[in-house]
Amino acid sequence: MNFGYNYFTGTGNAGDLAWAIARLFVREFNPAASVAHIASSLTTKFRAIYNSIGGSSFAWGDLGGAILDIGELLLTFAPSAGIWRITKFLWGSSNLL
């Protein structure tokens, strides 16, 4: 399911998207932070992205910038993973986004 696109177009829930990504992230990187903490941070990030792009005017082309913002946030939870592994993770979970 495209939780991300659904959320950014106003038809989905930020919390559902955040939990889906956070669970996968914890499974992949085993960071010190809990799933709940990561999901909370992601929810805040998703809402900020949504507000910055004007809500329902979100287009597929906007998703690239959103994924970059999400990757930068995730890098703060697993800095030793490096940007390449974070990018690979996001690409692998792109069906959620």
Image (spheres, rainbow, N blue to C red):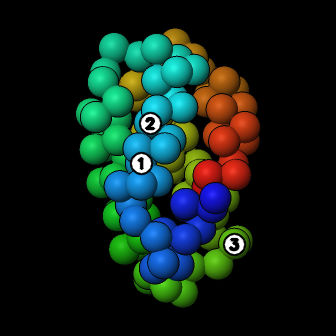
Reading the image, the residue beneath label 3 is: 60
Res 65 visible: no
In the visual, does 14 lie left or right of 93? left
Res 74 visible: yes
- Alpha-carbon distance for marks 1 and 2? 6 Å
- Image point (61%, 30%), residue name: 86
Q: Give the camera-side residue of 34 and 87.
A: 34
- Alpha-carbon distance for marks 1 and 3? 19 Å
In the visual, does 67 lie left or right of 75? right
What is the secondary structure assignment of the residue under circle 1?
A: helix
Q: What is the crowding at mark 2: few (fewer than 14 residues within 10 Å), some, or many (at least 20)? A: many
Q: Quadrant of the N terminus?
A: bottom right
Identify residue type, mark 3. Trp
Q: Position of residue 52 (x, y in %)?
A: 41, 72
Q: Position of residue 77 (x, y in %)?
A: 40, 25
- Image point (55%, 60%), residue name: 3
Q: Give the camera-side residue of 93 and 75.
A: 93
Whichever of callouts 1 and 3 sits on the residue coming sooner in the sequence is 1
Reading the image, the residue beneath label 2 is: 22
Reading the image, the residue beneath label 1 is: 18
- Image point (30%, 24%), residue name: 34
